């Protein structure tokens, strides 16, 4: 089996992370590399189409597995257990339920260790491949863009492509900062976008002082929603949300949640809910409520003063299950 892993990894350009154990690398190659190959094949062979069907995905994967089994016949029992079980379908189904993460190349090692179950693709500023991005977007049911992304020409291209896709999207942090710099991109906002700015990001987006916005959160939240059609979640001591159905104020949460990464956790909750087909209009209020409950549980377990974003993450399941 090790020979097969080596061939697959070499063929697809998959490298071990620093100090990665063999078992972890083997798992990642089988679970992730075939999915990455399928994306690249879909782009090459189906570039004229909008996306690629599930049937075509399975055929592509099946053909690739046939190729590797021909090289290593001893692996056939692992790949094709019987005529009723096709590992290509199994891998495709796993891949459809897996997050796809596009990030800078220098983040690969750390994210690979933290998220071994995620599909990770990377880019560099000097060699940015717009076609790879477009192929990844076609694969997505929902997108989050912004946290930890930075700003610049490449990031502008990423945000622009995401908005043009019309896929349900949560935009936070540098995604919002990028849009704030380009009025032409602002005009591409649509009703399947959720913006999640804090006061500073909202200030840059509107070119209005943060102090002025803080005096009337509801006014400015509704203003952006009305002008651009996007749902707005303005994060503050009491988060205010506005969409076409109304304006909402969240009352869960505490001051300890004003910590680095807390807003990124909220973005993740929103994307997870959207990915499970929760009603788009209900997601902002539900996600913000659960985020606040998780923060309240974290405060009870430790303290507001010592709370970190990871503490909020660790309590999301309890919040979601009502285990409090």
Image (cartoon, helix red, strand yellow):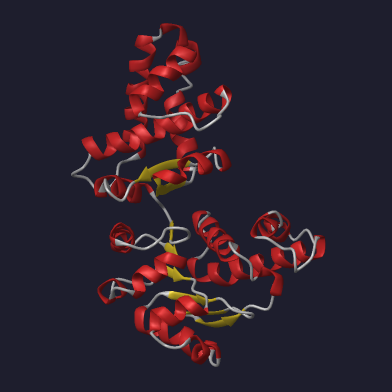
Q: Residue furthest top?
A: 74
Q: Is residue 29 above or below residue 248?
A: above
The residue positioned 44% from the left and 82% from the top of the image is 203
Q: Residue furthest left?
A: 48
Q: Is residue 266 above or below residue 133?
A: below
Q: Position of residue 146 (x, y in %)?
A: 43, 62
Q: Position of residue 274 (x, y in %)?
A: 50, 59
Q: Quadrant of residue 20?
A: top right
| In-image side of 281 versus 125 (left or right) | right
| In-image side of 266 versus 146 (left or right) | right
Regarding residue 147, the answer to whether it shows in the image is yes
The mark tally for this picture is: 0
The residue positioned 40% from the left and 44% from the top of the image is 105
249 or 2, which lies in front? 2
Q: Is residue 228 above or below residue 61?
A: below
The residue positioned 64% from the left and 80% from the top of the image is 237
Quarter of the image that includes the C terminus? bottom right
Q: Position of residue 28 (x, y in %)?
A: 50, 30
Q: Position of residue 300 (x, y in %)?
A: 81, 65
Regarding residue 254, the answer to whether it shows in the image is no
172 or 222, which lies in front? 172
């Amino acid at each position: 089996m090790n020979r097969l892993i080596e061939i697959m990894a070499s063929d697809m350009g998959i490298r071990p992370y620093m100090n990665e154990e063999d078992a972890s690398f083997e798992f990642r190659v089988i679970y992730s590399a075939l999915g990455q190959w399928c994306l690249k094949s879909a782009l090459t062979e189906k570039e004229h189409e909008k996306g690629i069907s599930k049937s075509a995905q399975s055929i592509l994967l099946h053909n690739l597995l046939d190729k590797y089994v021909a090289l290593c016949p001893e692996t056939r029992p692992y790949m094709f257990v019987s005529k009723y079980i096709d590992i290509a379908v199994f891998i495709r189904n796993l891949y459809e339920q897996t997050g796809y993460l596009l990030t800078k190349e220098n983040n690969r090692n750390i994210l690979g260790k933290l998220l071994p179950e995620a599909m990770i693709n990377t880019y560099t500023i000097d060699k940015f491949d717009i076609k790879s991005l477009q192929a990844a977007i076609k694969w997505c049911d929902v997108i989050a863009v912004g946290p930890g992304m930075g700003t610049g020409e490449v990031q502008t291209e990423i945000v622009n492509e995401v908005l043009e896709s019309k896929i349900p999207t949560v935009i936070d942090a540098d995604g919002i900062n990028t849009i704030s710099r380009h009025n032409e991109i602002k005009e591409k906002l649509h009703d399947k976008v959720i913006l999640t700015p804090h006061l500073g990001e909202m200030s840059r987006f509107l070119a209005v002082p943060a102090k002025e916005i803080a005096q009337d959160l509801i006014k400015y939240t509704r203003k952006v929603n009305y002008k651009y059609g996007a749902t707005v979640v303005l994060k503050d001591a009491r988060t205010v949300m506005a969409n076409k159905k109304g304006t909402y104020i969240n009352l869960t949460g505490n001051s300890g949640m004003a910590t680095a990464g807390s807003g990124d956790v909220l973005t993740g909750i929103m994307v997870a809910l959207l990915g499970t087909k929760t009603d788009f209009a209900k997601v902002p209020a539900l996600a913000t409520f659960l985020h606040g409950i998780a923060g309240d549980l974290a405060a009870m377990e430790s303290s507001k003063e010592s709370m970190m974003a990871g503490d909020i993450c660790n309590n999301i399941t309890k919040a979601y299950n009502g285990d409090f």
